[in-house]
Amino acid sequence: MPTDKQVPPGSRVAVIGAGVAGIMAASTLKQAGVEVDLYEKEERAGGHLNRWHHLFPGREEASLVREGYLQQLREHSLSLMLSAEVKAIVREPEGPAGGRFRVTTAAGDSRDYGAVLLATGFRLFDAALKEEYGYGIYPRVLTSPELEQRLSPGGAGLDTETGPPKRVAFVHCVGSRDAKVGNRYCSRVCCITGVKQAMAVRERYPGCEVINFYMDLRMFGSGYEELYQEAQEVHGVNFIRGRVSEAAKTLGGAIQVKAEDTLLGRPLKVTVDWLVLLVGMEPSLSAELLASLALESDQAGFVASRDKFLQPGQSSADGVFLAGACGGPASLPESVNQARAAALSVITYLNRKG
Ligand SMILES: Cc1cc2nc3c(=O)[nH]c(=O)nc-3n(C[C@H](O)[C@H](O)[C@H](O)COP(=O)(O)OP(=O)(O)OC[C@H]3O[C@@H](n4cnc5c(N)ncnc54)[C@H](O)[C@@H]3O)c2cc1C
Ligand code: SF4
């Protein structure tokens, strides 16, 4: 445990967002003796992880992993403010109390801090913008987060009026790598999410054929390639390199998918009980917050690091740090690593200041 000399007293830190990144950053700071307030706009902590079923690459129960993170909150008696959306962060001149940032919530409460750590995560691409897939029009077209919910304990599953599903298809890169919707970047985790979900469907409905339509597969993480092999060899998931051009409802309520197999160079038509759209991640930090802190963002709109190589957890603004998916698409382990590293940068900054 560091001494008071190492961590100046009175230097509180505001962590914005109590997803995995925010929880891990706040608990790391608290363990180092820094006082932290953790702001969360929702009614519970955990962020998007609250909505997932199994996790890639190890297929752990998401609820158990989430419990491990929540345990961090309890163990370190973190000051967590729920239903507390941060609306404004204003840099103030140095005062006697050393407060440099005034953080104000939607309810109008304000407090001063020595540093701010952004862990506001991401939002999901709105699949209705890709009209050709019929999301929001045909009930049997789902997004990947909706499938997570359906497969979770107590979820609706994929049974139809005629019984268990016979065929399910996934479409990769929905809202990512797509200049038409303004998102040229790869969302990084949707390929492996598609593999994880395809395996989950095959396990729950062994008689169901599963097809993943992909542009190319990006299995960059540790254990991802192995999971992809397992999906094919053990679970019999079909991966077709192809572009889905259109989805339409059949008379029976199923979905007819038109695609092109780009490896064989031939058009395809398949009828599926469910079509699952692997939606990408988009920046979620409001334009007001970006502007009030004079923060730079990257080409995609995610909060930019000051220096990707040397100071990845530090934003372009002095005293403002970032971790997790607010800086760009990231997995849970990556978000945790970033959170711990950003917390260390905050401590270094406070020490230098004090
Ligand atoms: C369909 C899908 C499945 C996935 N499955 C996996 C998986 O199996 N394994 C894996 O490793 N990763 C998975 N991921 C990725 C994982 O969800 C992210 O890595 C993780 O959620 C990032 O955590 P975060 O804390 O950065 O952001 P988030 O989870 O988005 O949390 C951010 C938090 O900040 C809060 N917030 C935002 N703005 C404010 C504000 N102004 N004031 C206060 N609070 C605010 C939000 O309410 C939220 O609680 C999946 C992603 C998707 C899309
Ligand atoms: S991770 Fe895969 S599905 Fe997601 S955008 Fe990248 S290539 Fe497409």
Image (spheres, helix red, strand yellow):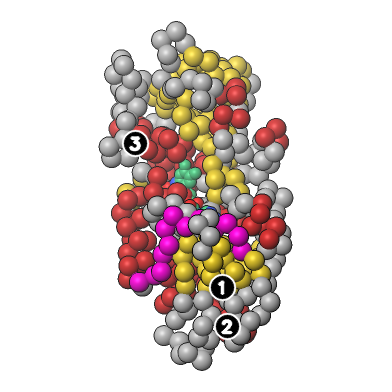
Measured as percent of width and height from the top left, residue 265 is found at: 63, 21
Q: Which of 333 and 280 is in front in this view?
A: 280
Q: Quadrant of ligand 2?
A: top right
Measured as percent of width and height from the top left, residue 118 is found at: 56, 62
Residue pointed to by mark 1: 112
In which quadrant of the rendered image does the N terminus lie? bottom left
Q: Distance between the residues labelled 2 and 1?
A: 9 Å
Measured as percent of width and height from the top left, residue 96 is found at: 61, 85
Callout 1, which amino acid? Asp
Callout 2, which amino acid? Ala
Write down the quadrant of residue 304 in the picture.
bottom right
Q: Distance between the residues labelled 1 and 3?
A: 43 Å
Residue pointed to by mark 3: 151
In which quadrant of the rendered image does the C terminus lie? bottom right
**Is 60 inside the magenta-drawn segment?**
no
**SS class, disc 1:** strand
Residue occupying image coordinates x 61% and y 71%: 101
Residue depth check, mark 3 versus mark 2: number of the one nearer the observer: 2
Q: Farthest residue to the top: give it.
A: 251
Callout 3, which amino acid? Leu
Give the total of numbered labels.
Answer: 3
Measured as percent of width and height from the top left, residue 173 is found at: 58, 36
Write down the quadrant of residue 149 in the picture.
top left
Q: Would residue 217 be seen by someone viewing this image from the given angle? A: no
User: Closer to the N terminus: mark 3 or mark 2?
Assistant: 2
